[in-house]
Image: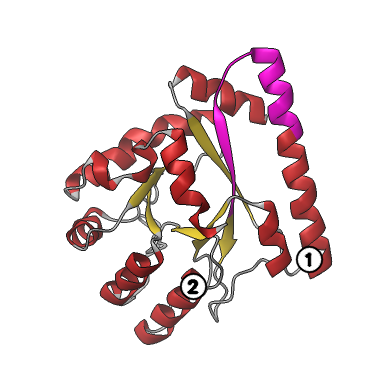
Amino acid sequence: NPFSDYLDQAVDLSYEYIGVSDHNPSIANHSEKQIVEIMKRRKEAYEHKYSSWRKKSNKNVHYFLLCEVDMLPDGKLALPDAAFAYVDGVIASLHSSFTQDRKTITKRIITGLTGNPKVRIFGHPTARLLGSREGVDADWQEVFAVCKVQDIALEINAGPGRLDLPDTLVYDAVKEKLKFCISTDSHSVEGMDLIRYGVSVARRGWATKHDILNTLGYNEFRTWLMKGA
């Protein structure tokens, strides 16, 4: 859907803001210089689309320009350092090499989470796909400790095929006083309605609204997100 459709839906849902989080450009198909240029053009394009929507709709929903960035098998982030200037924050996620042993994948996750100050959210942390792929075998207490020090939020992905972070790990993270963001992983406007499934997972993990960062108002959420800027 066009960006304007998401903004219109956000108005209908009474949201103050949404996050836009396309995936990083392919590092296999682009040079670092090309990726930086793509990210620059992306930022300019969203700014133009948002400005046009505001003028046409006369409505007031904010947006944060995020990017979901792969943690490569060695933990390096699949985005050149210069490209981070064109995002408000980064969601770091696992999208490959899921069978690495516990020690290796724990080190990989920690390397990715500490790879740049703009990493603010750990996306679908176990990387499970319900019915087709088990979650990774990581030392979650060690990962949670790093998230706490770095003030990184754990995603609760509301997509019915993920529901990740699982409720049992939500419970463990709540006990460690970690914070969460509930996202819909929307690939269409209709996907924004999936938020209720993420809320249900959070509740089963004994989380309350005070544990969920995107229950905050725009200014408060912006202050948290921009800590890495």
Q: Position of residue 115 (x, y in %)?
A: 54, 73
Is residue 142 in the magenta section? no
Q: Please tell me which residue lies in front, 179 or 74.
A: 179
Asked whether, in this view, residue 77 is left or right of residue 16, the answer is: right
Q: For numbered disc 1, what is the local secondary structure? A: loop
Q: Please tell me which residue lies in front, 11 or 188.
A: 11
Quadrant of the frame with the N terminus: top right
Q: Position of residue 190 (x, y in %)?
A: 50, 28
Q: Is residue 194 above or below residue 182?
A: above
Which residue corresponds to the image point at 55% horizontal and 60% vertical from the top-left?
118
Q: Please tell me which residue lies in front, 72 or 133.
A: 72
Q: Which numbered circle lies on residue 29?
A: 1
Q: Can residue 223 be seen in this view?
A: yes
Quadrant of the frame with the C terminus: bottom right
Q: Which numbered circle lies on residue 90?
A: none
User: Disc 2 marks which residue?
Assistant: 114
Q: Position of residue 111 (x, y in %)?
A: 49, 77
Which of the two discs, 1 and 2, sits closer to the camera?
Answer: 2
Which residue corresponds to the image point at 59% horizontal and 50% vertical from the top-left?
88
Could you classify mark 1 by the number of other residues whose Cα lies within 10 Å: few (under 14), some (14-19), or many (20 or more)?
few
Q: For numbered disc 2, what is the local secondary structure? A: loop
Is residue 50 in the magenta section? yes
* Count of all numbered marks drawn on residues in the image: 2
Please give the range of residues in magenta. Answer: 48-67
Q: Is residue 99 above or below residue 61?
A: below
Q: Earlier in the sequence, mark 1 or mark 2?
A: 1
Asked whether, in this view, residue 78 is left or right of residue 45, the answer is: left
Tell me how far mark 1 sits from mark 2, CA to CA. Answer: 25 Å
